[in-house]
Image (cartoon, helix red, strand yellow):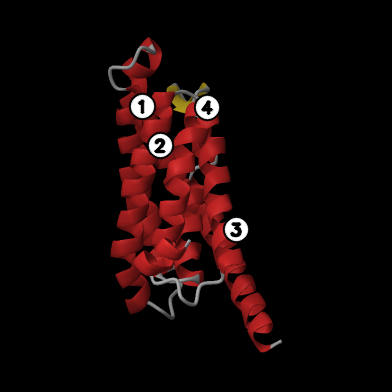
């Protein structure tokens, strides 16, 4: 932890909050990586059930940055990254574990670095940054994951249909994120800010 403090400027970090955020990321990743192995059909197109869960990662990342800062958010990603590989490999297989960790790292570091600037510019408009990051991060993460996990894999069905499945997943994730998760995010953000404010003055 001392090394993380030096690397990620954690001198004033709430370690309890940090570990809760790490645990949140891990639970979402583990659940989505297990469920991604199961596919279905919608309007004649293939999809995986993980698309119902993984949009939560984007929301969790944005909340992480808002409740801490970009340095501490990187610490959350750094702490969640190694066990994400291990847990995903154990409950799915090594290729899904690697693909998940690879896509998660690239997508979330990109989100933390790039969209922090949007958050700083649109401070009063809380919905702008999560809306933009949800759209872009879901595209980057989903296509990276399915390419790394299933392109030329031994699973003939997934190898043949990964691009179609990834596209369906991306569209669904973005729609669900805007219609459902973004409003929930706004309510949760206001509640957490109020809660942290109460604790700070208590």
Residue 90 badge: 4
Point out the frontmost of discs 1 and 4: 4
Cα–Cα span, label 1 and label 4: 15 Å
Of pointers 4 and 2, the one earlier in the residue sequence: 4
Of pointers 2 and 3, the one earlier in the residue sequence: 3
Q: Are marks 1 and 4 in contact (CB under 8 Å)?
A: no
Cα–Cα span, label 3 and label 1: 28 Å
What residue sits 63% from the left and 82% below the top? 197
What residue sits 42% from the left and 54% below the top? 77
Q: Is residue 52 left or right of residue 145?
A: right
Residue 64: horizontal and vertical position, in percent? 49, 63
Q: Exactly how many numbered labels are in the figure?
A: 4
Task: Please tell me whether residue 52 is drawn above or below residue 62 in the rendered image.
Answer: above
Of pointers 1 and 4, the one earlier in the residue sequence: 4
Q: Secondary structure at mark 1?
A: helix
What residue sits 66% from the left and 76% below the top? 195
Q: Characterize the local packing of mark 3: few (<14), some (14-19) or many (20 or more) Cα atoms within 10 angstroms.
A: few
Q: Are marks 4 and 2 in contact (CB under 8 Å)?
A: no
Residue 41: horizontal and vertical position, in percent? 50, 22
Cα–Cα span, label 2 and label 1: 8 Å
Tell me the quarter of the image containing the C terminus.
bottom right
Residue 83: horizontal and vertical position, in percent? 49, 41
Q: Secondary structure at mark 3?
A: helix
Residue 10: horizontal and vertical position, in percent? 44, 71
Q: Are marks 2 and 3 in contact (CB under 8 Å)?
A: no
Q: Secondary structure at mark 2?
A: helix
Q: Which residue is mark 2?
A: 100
Of pointers 3 and 1, the one earlier in the residue sequence: 3
Q: Which residue is mark 1?
A: 149
Q: Which residue is mark 3?
A: 20
Q: Could you say which is closer to the camera, residue 78 or residue 140?
A: 78
Residue 71 badge: none
């Amino acid at each position: 932890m001392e090394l993380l403090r030096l690397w990620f400027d954690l001198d004033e970090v709430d370690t309890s909050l940090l570990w809760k955020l790490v645990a949140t990321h891990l639970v979402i990743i583990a659940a989505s990586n297990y469920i991604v192995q199961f596919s279905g059909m919608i309007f004649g197109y293939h999809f995986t059930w993980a698309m119902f869960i993984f949009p939560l990662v984007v929301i969790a990342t944005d909340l992480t940055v808002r409740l801490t800062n970009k340095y501490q958010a990187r610490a959350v990603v750094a702490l969640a990254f190694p066990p994400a590989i291990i847990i995903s490999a154990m409950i799915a297989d090594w290729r899904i574990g690697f693909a998940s960790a690879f896509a998660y790292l690239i997508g979330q570091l990109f989100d933390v670095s790039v969209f922090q600037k949007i958050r700083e510019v649109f401070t009063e408009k809380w919905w702008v940054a999560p809306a933009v990051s949800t759209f872009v991060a879901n595209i980057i993460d989903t296509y990276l994951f399915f390419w790394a996990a299933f392109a030329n894999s031994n699973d003939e069905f997934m190898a043949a249909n990964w691009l179609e499945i990834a596209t369906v997943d991306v569209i669904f994730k973005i729609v669900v994120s805007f219609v459902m998760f973004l409003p929930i995010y706004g309510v949760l953000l206001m509640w957490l800010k109020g809660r942290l404010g109460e604790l700070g003055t208590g």
